[in-house]
């Protein structure tokens, strides 16, 4: 079975028109699944819940399998109110990124997103009884752990792997983008609208290290498993996720699609992919190493 | 409000018990708990001694089993749950869905607390853990404002414990993998954040540098006090500025919020610091005992004494404290 391609939710805050143009383009792209919605900051409102639901209908009409993604850090009653509406939408599957969403999806099919900690078979089996239909491998786990998890996977549950994008590494009550502009969170002036890939954070010896995306901290480097397609197939991964970035997402999808169809050698695809990243690649987590490392570079030094 | 104090070893446990803790929390000497540091925690023999010491003085003992097992390690965590049940601890503090599920099914009489590593920041999440596993208490991540804590407690199916003092996580616990991004080891997988095994201290021409997994965390000039390189407390460059981009080296101290926490219905206050010395545990426990008693007697007139604050400042990271997320402007 060839894995299907999915497009993860946009993790950044883009102007409404940019979002709509982006999805108009994605409707024509080879991704089979599209995850839609705000997962990072409840204050972001260029797209309201109704707008996301409307977009979901349009993409479904274009033949995409649509999943509604939900917030990872759920704190206020207003967050729960929005979550209840999404979980009770009655039509589309929901991607839970917090246990609140798992509870609110009870009895309905749902996807456990990267915000849900599923580290072992017993955890997976428990959520399968709650209606889990697909789970995303936690970002810090390796292909060895994935192999063990696949052996324990309950019937009727698909496996998805985050295979391309800056990695969401942490969430906080504090907004780091507002902090970078010396603004309080309650008056953030929506400055993350200015940074379509987040703000790169550099160490004092000029190593690009992390990216600030509001209350979320990401890797500066882009996680990429295009060179690992053979292993992803061997591990019977059902869905491969590409996380949107500020530019070139269409080309990224094209390279993954070409490699999956056999029209392009994954090693060649991975080399071309590097040129499309904001900073550069990493894949350490997949190999059981520090997440920021890049196996190809390590091999070259050895 | 119950005072829950850290016990990284037997002397620290005794210090907590002798100085006014209502409960102590501890862990086994391995990666099943989130303070998996060399030389810390309890062997089965020591844990029995500790439990006896606390029991004789009517102090409760909670066992932290709050990391996330992967399939290859599952048996160890399962055995640890069985050991905790056999030890008849007053509660098991757990985070992982699989561990909670196993404990609830196999040992229905073992009281369960949801660990801060379980990352539950709202009452719908708490309802899930309560309905599925019958948790009796939840420890909240250090990301909620005081108002949010209060409204959560109003809807929570279980009593709530919050952090009162100690090292401050600025990220929501259980969902932060910054440490493994730099080192391969995280609180979830290994039970340690910014592990000592990956720390380097280097004297250079530009000053003393601290690194984690090779990543430069901080650079100190002559006369500056160097601190442990916790990843989220380093100085980094964003745009044109170099600053503590995530958080300063500082500790959480909510002493002045005690009356408000009591009014909000908080059931227990947790003191962080199983990795700290018995002297730390003794000093901090004594101050918090006195403060909690004063607050219970007369919350209207409660005011943190200068002597209490001086003791707490002295043992704080960077000798500074903050109200953290409880205070909205911090966010």
Image (cartoon, coloured by chain):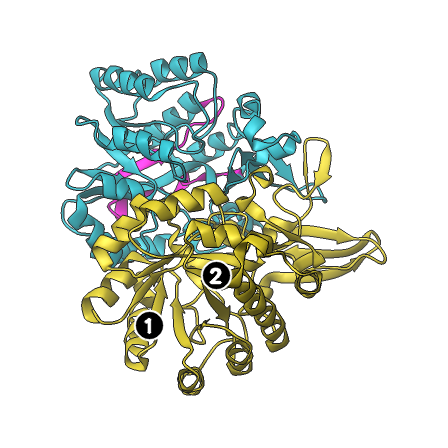
Q: In which quarter of the image is the N terminus of chain A?
A: top left
Badge 1 marks a residue whose secondary structure is helix
Where is residue B38? Give x, y as percent: 54, 74
Q: Which of B275 and B287 is in front in this view?
A: B287
Q: Work out whether residue A4 or residue B6 is closer to the camera in this orientation and state it.
A: B6
Q: Distance between the residues labelled 2 and 1?
A: 30 Å
Query: Which badge, 2 or 1, is on the more N-terminal residue?
Result: 1
Residue highlighted by disc 1: B76
Q: The cyan chain is which one?
A: A
Question: Residue A134's quadrant in the figure?
Answer: top left
Q: Can residue A231 be seen in this view?
A: no
Nearest to the eye among marks 2 and 1: give it.
Answer: 2
Image location of residue B153, percent across then percent down: 37, 48
Please name the color used to draw chain B: yellow
User: For the point 72% across and 35% down, which residue is it?
Assistant: B241
Instruction: Tell which subunit mark 1 falls on.
Output: B
Residue occupying the point 65% across, 57% down = B229
Residue stretch rendered in magenta on the structure: A220-248
Residue B322 x, y percent position in the rendering: 63, 50
The reply, left or right, for residue B38 in relation to residue A58 is: right
Could one spot residue A154 in this view of the protein?
Answer: yes
Residue indicated by mark 2:
B269
């Amino acid at each position: 079975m060839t894995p299907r391609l999915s497009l993860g939710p946009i993790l950044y805050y883009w102007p409404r028109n940019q979002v709509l143009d982006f999805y108009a383009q994605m409707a024509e792209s080879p991704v089979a699944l599209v995850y839609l919605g705000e997962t990072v900051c409840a204050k972001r409102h260029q797209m309201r819940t109704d707008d996301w639901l409307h977009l979901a209908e349009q993409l479904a009409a274009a033949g995409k399998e649509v999943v509604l993604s939900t917030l990872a850090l759920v704190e206020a009653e207003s967050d729960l109110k929005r979550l209840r509406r999404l979980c009770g939408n009655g039509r589309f599957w929901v991607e839970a990124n917090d246990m609140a969403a798992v509870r609110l999806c009870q009895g309905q099919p749902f996807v456990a997103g990267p915000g849900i900690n599923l580290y072992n078979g017993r955890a997976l089996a428990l959520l399968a009884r709650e209606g889990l239909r697909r789970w995303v491998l936690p970002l810090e786990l390796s292909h060895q752990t994935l192999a063990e998890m696949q052996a324990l996977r309950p019937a009727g549950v698909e496996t998805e792997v985050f295979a391309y994008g800056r990695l969401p590494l942490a969430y906080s009550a504090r907004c780091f983008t507002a902090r970078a502009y010396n603004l309080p969170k309650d008056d953030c002036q929506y400055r993350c609208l200015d940074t379509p890939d987040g703000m790169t954070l550099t160490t004092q010896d000029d190593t690009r290290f992390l990216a600030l995306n509001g209350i979320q901290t990401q890797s500066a480097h882009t996680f990429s498993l295009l060179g690992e397609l053979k292993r992803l197939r061997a591990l019977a991964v059902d869905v491969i996720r590409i996380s949107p970035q500020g530019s070139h997402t269409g080309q990224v999808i094209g390279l993954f699609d070409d490699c999956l169809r056999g029209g392009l050698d994954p090693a060649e695809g991975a080399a071309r992919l590097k040129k499309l990243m904001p900073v550069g690649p990493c894949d350490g987590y997949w190999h059981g190493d520090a997440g920021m490392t890049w196996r190809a570079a390590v091999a070259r030094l050895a | 409000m119950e005072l829950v104090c850290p016990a990284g070893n037997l002397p620290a446990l005794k210090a907590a018990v002798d100085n006014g803790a209502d409960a102590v929390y501890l862990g086994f000497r391995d990666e099943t708990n989130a303070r998996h540091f060399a030389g810390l925690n309890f062997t089965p023999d020591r844990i029995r001694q500790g439990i006896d010491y606390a029991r004789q003085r009517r102090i409760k003992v909670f066992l932290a089993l709050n990391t996330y097992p992967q399939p290859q390690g599952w048996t160890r965590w399962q055995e640890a749950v069985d050991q905790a049940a056999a030890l008849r601890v007053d509660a098991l503090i757990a985070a992982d869905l699989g561990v909670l599920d196993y404990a609830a099914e196999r040992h229905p009489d073992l009281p369960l607390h949801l660990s801060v590593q379980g990352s539950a920041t709202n009452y719908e999440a708490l309802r899930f853990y309560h309905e599925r596993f019958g948790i009796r208490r939840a420890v909240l991540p250090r990301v909620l404002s005081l108002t949010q804590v209060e409204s959560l407690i109003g809807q929570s199916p279980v009593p709530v414990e919050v952090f009162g003092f100690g090292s401050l996580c600025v990220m929501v616990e259980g969902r932060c993998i910054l440490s493994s991004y730099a080192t391969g080891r995280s609180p979830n997988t290994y039970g340690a954040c910014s592990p000592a095994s990956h720390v380097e201290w280097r004297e250079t021409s530009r000053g003393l540098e601290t690194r984690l997994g090779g990543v430069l965390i901080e650079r100190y000039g002559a006369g500056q006090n160097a601190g442990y390189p916790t990843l989220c407390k380093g100085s980094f460059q964003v745009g044109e500025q170099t600053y503590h981009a995530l958080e300063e080296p500082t500790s959480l101290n909510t002493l002045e919020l005690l009356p408000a926490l009591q009014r909000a219905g908080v059931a227990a206050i947790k003191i962080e610091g199983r990795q700290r010395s018995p002297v730390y545990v003794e000093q901090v426990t004594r101050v918090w005992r006195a403060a909690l008693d004063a607050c219970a007697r007369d919350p209207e007139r409660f005011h943190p004494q200068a002597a209490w604050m001086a003791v707490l400042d002295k043992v704080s990271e960077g000798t500074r404290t903050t109200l953290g997320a409880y205070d909205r402007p911090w966010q």
